[in-house]
Image (tube, rainbow, N blue to C red):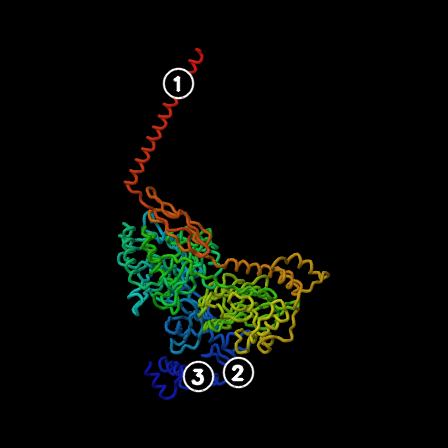
Amino acid sequence: MIEYRLAWASQGFVSDATFAAHTITKMMGRCTTGTVILLLLLSCISRTLGESCEGKCGQSTSSCSCQPTCASLERCCPDYKEFCMEFSPQSGSILGGTDFLLLHATFNQSSLIVCKFNDDIRTAGYVDESNRGHCISPLLYRTGWVSVQISSNYGITFNRVGSWLAVHTGKLDSKFKAVLVNSTKWQYYGTPQVGGALQMTWNTSLVPTQRVNIELWGYRETGRPYSDLWRGEWKYLYSLAEDVANNGSFTFVPQPSPEFSSWELGALRVSSSAKPNGLTDVQAAWTEDHALAWHLEHTFRNDSQAWALAKCLAWDRLENDLPDFLGEIIDCPCTLAQARADTGRFHTDYGCDMEKGSVCTYHPGSVHCVRAIQASPRYGAGQQCCYDSSGAQVLTADSIGGSTPDRAHDWGSPPYGSPPRVPGQSHWVYDVLSFYYCCLWSDNCHYYFKHRPSSDCRRYRPPSSAAVFGDPHFITFDGVRYSFNGKGEYNLLTSPGKRLTIQGRNEPVDNGNATKLSSVVMKEAFSDVIEVRLVAGDDNLQVLRDQKPLLFNEQSWMDLKGVFVFSPSAANVTVMFPSGAGVEVRLRDGVLAATVLLPEQFRNSTVGLLGNVNGVAGDDLLPARGRSPVDSSNAEEVFKFGASWAVSNTSALFTYDSKNLLETFYNSPRHDPDFIPTFSVPENPDDPLYNIASEVCSGDDSQFCRYDILVGRSPELGKTTKVSFHSHVSLVEDLKPVISCGWLAPPTNGAKEGTTYLQGATVRLLCNHGFALRGSDKRTCQADGTWSGGDTVCDLSSPSNNTAVIAGSVVGVLLAIALITTGLVLWIKKRGRSRSLTGLSANL
């Protein structure tokens, strides 16, 4: 085929369309020479007129558009949906097997569909009885949006493009996967008192066929770690059942499999029995990957403790030879409040989530865990932080349920593809299976915690926060409060050094002479551009990625290019960048509110409406082209300050996909000089809203709240502003720096009471029976990060000392007895003499 194409190229015919037409004619004999010429002529005319989106998705011509905004602007080329494809469903497991429909495109029954993922993985598609095309997703060692190219001529040309979302098995919605019933039993199977039948269930629509096979697939990593030969291997092992009824449930009593017992990690696949066992890229439903305790050899079942200890010791020896990754991972937040508030750098661990009632199987004693969102730069390592019901961090030095770092980040990390960056599986191999060996299948956790000790929070620095809400009111990173009601598009924050840009759009409110925040758009370095905005007539937030709407109806978390987006509800979106910057956008009663979180490395590197992060309030309101900050109490000066931060035509990141947006913002000044808002709150007792404002607004929020009611003419907006204001105040409180003195070890031959190591906490130190305490019996964490008192030592009392003590005690007792006896004798004699004198006196 290559030689055949080169021959044509030598004649000047080099386009894929030309090559495809000639190849089809040559190989299939279905076209005449005249037909080929006609096809080429039509293709040439189409390209000349610029009316086709073939090979031009994302581009625009003078006559029509192939950009994502073309539909709403009614400028799409006629074949836009035919070549710039959408899929249903749009997401599935990274393990593959999802059958998805190619929307808006029609095919012939003779079309031979090939789907190419990520430019290098091909799977065979098919055409159904309704002439609709389908693809089957392949195994992908990566998460996030993957490019998909579609060919209808068996891979000769790929002229249709789209994107597919590959999802980590742990983050995949349960409706898209098979479920292990009582998963704990599956993973403890074969240990003492754990046996019997196992069950799995699935939605039969995932495999729409009468009969199915149940297969076991395994994963392992081969080659020397951190070498070029380090590889992941995903392999079909054997079938548990063949040609069974597809009733959505399968129950079996597992038997050991000596031949495959070296495979300790894997997943089960449900696929059509019409396909051969072990065939890749077929429609299927997968379970989550899990420890394969239930299929391990008889040796494991006969003595799981001894088997697991041997594995634990082997892992211990391996870890001794691997690089130390602990120094490059981020420290944990000190408190549960900090961990939940620092949404730019930490996200809930799905296995221990207090909001979903997780039982925290791997972290007994903890109520909530979070994971660092970003993997470490060199080793792709992760961090996990767990907290108890008091909000204190749980450390492995005190409890088996403590926080543990990870050699491989559970969620993987770019560039993905190979260990230790394979999402999920690499983490299982190096961090989870070893936990089973050392802690769950045997009682040897000290080996595990030697290599996975909790990091405390002495190096943790909470982020700074700023907020925009209401008729937009601003609270800068350093706490300056002001209102800016300009109409236009403005730089909320720019950080040239970190290449972070966040912009906001203000639009007029319905009834008052003020504006409100209606859109926030952002990017960092070469990331995708993410915009979160209000849409007229819609009660939900709309999220756009590079001008194209993102749908969160299937998954709540998306890995994108240089950015993560989490949307647990239609009114809540969090955007997270590799720098640790986070942007939270909330929809409250139809009003947009945004919070920006910046870690310490942004200090003294930001400008814009949210100010400079440096702890100095006086320099926050610095105009874009000025050297002197304005007075936040002067509303007109503040308005000029805000106007100076209007975005330029070349720097605007917003999406303009309606005639209104084009006319109001794109083809107009970025700051509308003709819109002059009301600067101060009118104090008119005759205003029907005056008493309402007095009732609703009080305390620190009254300035903003009263403005939104009396100027914005909306009591509801005033109440929402009050909620947003107090929400930000609570966030700032949660993120206050906390002093930690670090873990305090119990004395040798002793114990301690207390496992909180933050400022003000006191730990009591005790000695075992037969040992004497020397030093401090209690120590308190001080404001300078050090423990009060001195080292505590438990001394073993020596036998000679014991004898001396006993002898001393005996002597003391004898002396006491002698003294008492002597006193008693003297008293008796004295009394007797007294009686004799009394008798003598009477006789006288």
From what the image shows, is residue 355 above or below residue 69?
above
Which quarter of the figure is the C terminus placed in?
top left
Q: Nearer the viewer, mark 2 or mark 3?
A: 2
Sequence-first tag of 2 and 1? 2
Going by the numbered disc 3, the residue's amino acid type is Leu
Query: Which secondary structure lies at badge 1?
Result: helix
Q: Which mark is residue 833?
A: 1
Residue 39: mark: 3
| Residue type pointed to by label 2 | Ser
Q: Nearer the viewer, residue 6 or 342?
A: 342
Give the residue at mark 2.
Answer: 62
> Where is residue 193 shown, x and y percent of the image?
33, 47
In primary-sequence order, the first of circles 2 and 3 is 3
Q: Residue at left 64%, top 58%?
A: 697
Q: If you read the primary sequence from the N terminus, does the residue marked by circle 1 or circle 3 appear first?
A: 3
Name the outermost residue toward the front.
Answer: 844
